Image (cartoon, rainbow, N blue to C red):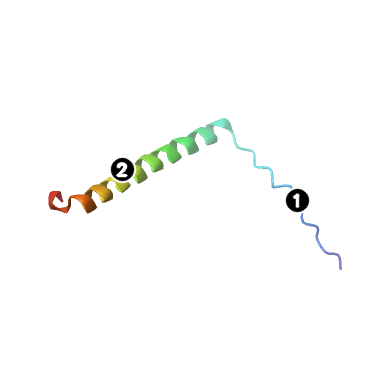
Amino acid sequence: MTIPRISSTPPHHSLTHENEASMSVENAVGLIVAVTLLAYLIIALIKPEKF
């Protein structure tokens, strides 16, 4: 029985530029949502009477 060798190089993923662009849009939208939610929660902590 032979032991399988583990490659030290990561697997090659063939991403097209279109997939990379859509991922950056998704990341940007996620970042905007996260920052907006963080700002809302901080304001709600500071001035709870407004909410």
Q: Is residue 29 above or below residue 38?
A: above
Q: Are marks 2 and 1 in contact (CB under 8 Å)?
A: no
Q: In the drawing, does residue 47 fall left or right of residue 22?
A: left
- Count the marks: 2
Residue that sits furthest to the top in the current view: 17
Name the outermost residue toward the left: 49
Q: Look at the numbered disc 2 and give the secondary structure of its residue.
A: helix
Q: Residue at x 42, y 37 (%)?
A: 28
Q: Tag 1: Cα neighbours inside 10 Å, few (<14), some, or many (≥20)?
A: few
Instruction: Specify whether 7 is left or right of 30.
Output: right
Q: Looking at this rendering, what residue extends furthest in the right direction?
A: 1
Q: Disc 2 to disc 1, how far (Cα)?
A: 41 Å
The percent position of residue 49, horizontal first and vertical second, equals 13, 52
Q: Amino acid at mark 1?
A: Ser
Q: Residues within 10 Å of mark 2 (few under 14, many from 20)?
A: few
Say whether residue 34 is left or right of residue 19.
Answer: left
Front of the two marks 2 and 1: 2
Nearer the observer, 18 or 51: 51
Identify the image quadrant of the N terminus. bottom right
Which residue is denoted by mark 2 in the rendering? 36
Task: Return the x and y of residue 22 as percentages of the image width and height.
Answer: 48, 35
Nearest to the observer: residue 8 or residue 20: 8
* Residue 8, numbered circle: 1
* Image point (56%, 31%), residue name: 17
Res. 50 mark: none
Amino acid, disc 2 = Thr
Query: Which comes before the other along the chain, label 2 or label 1?
Result: 1
- Measuring from the top left, give residue 46's x and y in whole percent: 21, 50
Residue farthest to the bottom?
Answer: 1
What secondary structure is found at the residue carrying circle 1? loop
The residue at the point 83 percent across, 64 percent down is 3
